[in-house]
Every structure is written in structure tokens, then in C-alpha cells.
Image: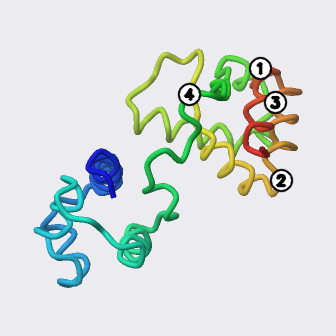
Amino acid sequence: MSSEYAKQLGAKLRAIRTQQGLSLHGVEEKSQGRWKAVVVGSYERGDRAVTVQRLAELADFYGVPVQELLPGTTPGGAAEPPPKLRLDLERLAHVPAEKAGPLQRYAATIQSQRGDYNGKVLSIRQDDLRTLAVIYDQSPSVLTEQLISWGVLDADARRAVAHEDV
């Protein structure tokens, strides 16, 4: 493993750990000693090579797919990034609650978590759209079409969903 690759892998490991609000010692405690803080730290710094088996186990511990930990899993800038998904909150307010209630609650939760109360638009992630699709018991592409028909998402959002299908 090249040292650059090891450093990139380590950066991904550190990002996942910190997203979960864990310190190195927190990892050791949560894993009941299975993952030593010093070992995880050396993986994160790129000082120590991690085997495929151990990486798979660490991904399982963090609850993420292994590919999320691997550097270079997205094309190196070769592909155009998917368009941003922006909810039009002003239009959402005019959609009947029996249709948009779950979306309105979800958007309010995101706003609260981010402290983002501009009230006009809210950027959401692909994962948010997938979660909403589960809530609405629809595929992401069907839900996207529904949100576009409500005027809550721009028609350009279709490209984001199409990008997922590639």
C-alpha cells in the first residue's frame, strides 16, 4: 500500500469516526477493547497498513459499507457531479399536509439540526432522498417525480436520481 493511499484511507477512517462522534478511546470503549485506540490511530495516520479483513471488520463496526472507506471510490473528477437537491420550502408550505406532512417534518428536522432557518430553500443529500423514498414507500425516482410535480424540487433533480442509477 502506497503511503499516499494509506493516508487517504486513514482520512476516510477518521472522517467516519468523527462523524459518529467517537474519539479514539471512544472506539476502544464501544468495541469493548476489540479496536485499540493506538491501532485505529495508526490506521488513521497511515502509519500502519490495514488488511482487507480488518478493514471489513472496521467498516462493520462503524456500520458503513467497505467502499465508503476506500479512497478513490468516486471518479477522480471525470464525471460531472450530480446536481444539488434543493427543496423549495415556500412551495412546500402550500402542498396539502396529507401529502407533504412527512416531508415537512423531515425538512423541519434537518433545519433544526443545521440551525438553518432561511425558510426559502433547503439543500438535501441523496441519502435524504432515499430515506424519504422509504418513508413514502416509493422508489427515489418515483418520489422525485412527485416532488417535481408539487413544485418542491426543480426538474434538474431528475439528473441526481439518474446519477444514482448509473
Q: Amino acid at mark 1?
A: Asp
In the rendered image, residue 37, in percent from the top left (x then y), is placed at: 13, 69
CA separation in Å, label 2 and label 1: 19 Å
Q: Amino acid at mark 4?
A: Gly
Q: Amino acid at mark 3?
A: Arg
Tag 1 secondary structure: loop
CA separation in Å, label 2 and label 4: 31 Å
Q: Which residue is mark 3?
A: 158
Q: Amino acid at mark 2?
A: Gln
Judge the density around disc 4: few (<14), some (14-19), many (≥20) Cα neighbours within 10 Å.
few
In this picture, residue 106 sits left or right of residue 103? left
Q: Which mark is residue 77?
A: 4
Q: Which mark is residue 5?
A: none
- Circles 2 and 1: CB distance less than 8 Å? no
Q: Which mark is residue 154?
A: 1
Tag 2 secondary structure: loop
Of residues 47 and 57, the one nearer the viewer is: 47
Tag 4 secondary structure: loop
Quadrant into which the C terminus falls: top right
Judge the density around disc 2: few (<14), some (14-19), many (≥20) Cα neighbours within 10 Å.
some
Q: Which residue is mark 2?
A: 138
Q: N-terminal of the two: label 2 or label 1? A: 2
The residue depicted at 83 percent of the width and 53 percent of the height is 138
Judge the density around disc 1: few (<14), some (14-19), many (≥20) Cα neighbours within 10 Å.
some
